[in-house]
Image (cartoon, grey):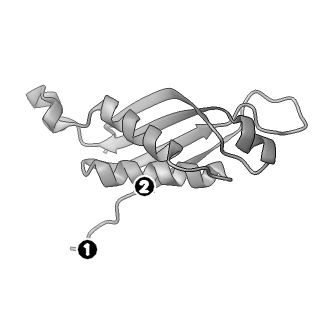
Amino acid sequence: MSDRIFIRGLSMHAYHGVMPHEAKVGQTFTLDLDLEIDLSDAARSDKVSDTVSYDQVATCASEAFGSRRFKLIEAAAGSVADAVLAAFPRVRTVAVTIHKPHAPIAATFSDVGVTVVRGRAKSKP
């Protein structure tokens, strides 16, 4: 399957991180989501009921990302991926990339982050 829905550059201010100052002042994170989904029904019907709503996916991801303070963005990404899979049964796999461009690193860099990929367990025949 190669059908995908994607959301790029979903920006949110949050208080994730290991360092104490990250919990106090927070920072802006950017999320990218890639959803593997069969879009053949939606392509034929032209009905939103045959796909997933970008708006609802963005809301779900935002709520999962901001639901609590995470020390690791790996954990935050996993939480977002799990929430998307739970909320949208049509989604087969989801890749969540979290960019942390203001990470406390003593180096010059343009971006750091993680990507997690989660999918549904395949049913046995």
The quadrant the N terminus occupies is: top left
Q: Is residue 55 left or right of residue 41?
A: right
Q: CA distance from mark 2 to mark 1?
A: 21 Å
Q: Which secondary structure, mark 1?
A: loop
As displayed, is residue 48 above or below residue 124? above
Pinpoint residue 22: horizontal percent, then vertical percent: 74, 41
Pinpoint residue 7: horizontal percent, then vertical percent: 43, 30
**Residue at figure coordinates x 82%, y 39% from the top left:** 104
Q: Which residue is mark 1?
A: 124
Q: Nearer the viewer, residue 49 or 63?
A: 63
Query: Few, some or many C-alpha atoms within 10 Å of disc 1 (few <14, some 14-19, many ≥20)?
Result: few
Determine the residue located farthest toward the left in the rendered image: 45
Q: Nearer the viewer, residue 122 or 63?
A: 63
Q: Which secondary structure, mark 2?
A: helix
**Residue at figure coordinates x 49%, y 53% from the top left:** 79
Badge number at residue 82: 2
Q: Is residue 121 left or right of residue 66?
A: left
Determine the residue located farthest toward the front in the rendered image: 24
Residue 16's quadrant in the figure? top right
